[in-house]
């Protein structure tokens, strides 16, 4: 039901097929999990097909190891007319020691479409309910402004033929 579910959690064990030659989970695998959780949250909120528009500020804080219990938490932190900003955290837990750690964090933007090849469609508005959610929304707004500045910079470079 659109406009109701604003958070999604995925949980699974990190497997040997997920790791690189150093024995840590591939950054690309983590990014795939982030995109999947963000997509699920965006669709749950909007009730529409969604596409990833951007991923900002991705930080790989701590490694994820084979056998870690991984939680990918995506939560809505801002809505536009057809866009949704998600804060996504990847948490890792060594089940033998009960150690929890933040592994990766980022902000994603999804756009709801009226069909898989369609046009942007409106999403339900979201309002923060507490100070923490207000801070997350302010972070989303700062990243949105920074992204607009980056777009202008790229456009200028393209115009100059760089």
Image (cartoon, rainbow, N blue to C red):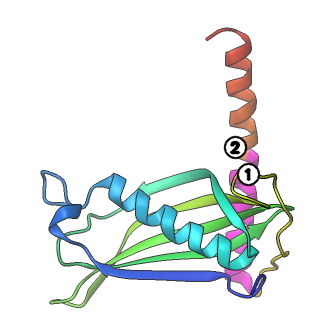
**Residue 152, image x and y in percent?**
76, 30
Contact (CB < 8 A) between labels 2 and 1? yes
Q: Secondary structure at mark 1?
A: helix
**Residue 108 appears at what percent x and percent y?**
60, 59
Residue at position x 68%, y 86% in the image: 5
Q: Is residue 78 above or below residue 150?
A: below
The image quarter containing residue 6 is bottom right
Q: Is residue 139 visible?
A: no
The quarter of the rendered structure image containing the C terminus is top right
Which region is colored magenta? 130-145
For disc 2, the marked residue is: 147
- Residue placed at 20% from the left, 69% from the top? 65
Q: Can you say whether 8 is above or below 31 in the image?
A: below
Relative to 66, is 101 on the left or the right?
right
Residue 13 placement, left or right of 43: left
What is the C-alpha distance between the residues marked 2 and 1? 5 Å
On whether residue 143 falls in the magenta region, the answer is yes
Residue at coordinates 83% horizontally, 62% vertically from top-left?
A: 80
Q: Main secondary structure of the magenta part?
A: helix
Residue on which disc 1 sits: 144
């Amino acid at each position: 039901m659109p406009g109701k579910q604003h958070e999604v959690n995925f949980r699974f064990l990190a497997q040997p097929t997920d790791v690189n030659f150093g024995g840590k989970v591939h950054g690309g695998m983590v990014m795939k999990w982030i995109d999947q959780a963000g997509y699920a949250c965006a669709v749950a909120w909007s009730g529409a097909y969604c596409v990833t528009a951007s991923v900002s500020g991705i930080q790989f804080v701590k490694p994820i190891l084979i056998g870690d219990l991984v939680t990918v938490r995506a939560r809505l932190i801002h809505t536009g007319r057809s866009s949704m900003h998600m804060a996504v955290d990847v948490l890792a837990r060594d089940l033998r020691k009960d150690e929890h750690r933040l592994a990766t964090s980022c902000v994603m933007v999804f756009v709801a479409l009226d069909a898989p090849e369609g046009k942007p469609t409106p999403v339900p508005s979201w309002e923060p309910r507490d100070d923490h959610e207000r801070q997350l929304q302010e972070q989303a707004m700062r990243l949105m402004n920074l992204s607009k500045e980056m777009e202008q910079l790229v456009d200028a470079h393209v115009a100059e033929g760089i």
